[in-house]
Image: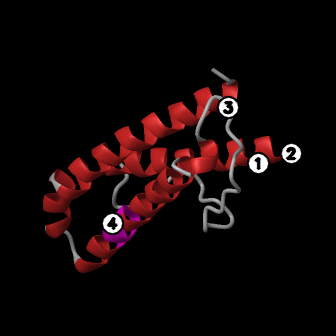
Amino acid sequence: MSGVRHRLDALYREAVTLGEQARIWFDGPGLRWRRKQPAAVQARVATESLATTARLVTVMAWLLDPRHAGDTPELAPFHPGEQPLPDPDLPPDHPLTGRPGAGIARRARILLRDTAALAAEESR
């Protein structure tokens, strides 16, 4: 298996795992916690939840591009939609800080960056 194929597979596994973790937390304990917060906090957390989902969907859509099939994939251009790519860490004053959702959001940001880096690296 080629190094690129291995990296694509690893990114795919991470995206699927992270997507499931995001769904469980943001739709379960995170949602219950968010509903008890002031409106401004609810909005900020909901926005980060949607951004996390968008990042994961962007990565998954790119990973599932038919050009990536086979042992020697030809990588499609990657257009993450966010320019510049977001800093991996949430601001220290973000209401998710210290909650499981912060780790999920951070990992989604890193996954987006890793995917963009792979696409850029292979396009050279």
Circle 3 packing at 10 Å, graded few (<14), some (14-19), many (20+), is some
Quick one: 64 or 82, which is closer to the camera?
64
Q: Are marks 2 and 1 in contact (CB under 8 Å)?
A: yes
Type of amino acid under label 1 = Ala
Q: Which residues are magenta?
A: 44-49
Of marks 3 and 1, which one's residue comes earlier in the chain? 3
Q: Main secondary structure of the magenta part?
A: helix
Task: Give x and y (percent) for residue 80.
Answer: 61, 61
Q: CA distance from mark 3 to mark 4?
A: 35 Å
Q: Which residue is mark 2?
A: 124
Q: Which residue is mark 1?
A: 120
The residue furthest top is: 1
Q: CA distance from mark 4 to mark 2?
A: 38 Å
Type of amino acid under label 2 = Arg
Q: Which residue is mark 3?
A: 4
Task: Give x and y (percent) for residue 79.
Answer: 65, 62
SS of the residue at dot 4?
A: helix
Q: CA distance from mark 2 to mark 1?
A: 7 Å
Q: CA distance from mark 4 to mark 1?
A: 31 Å
Of marks 4 and 1, which one's residue comes earlier in the chain? 4
Which quarter of the figure is the N terminus placed in?
top right
Q: Which residue is mark 4?
A: 45
Q: CA distance from mark 3 to mark 1?
A: 12 Å
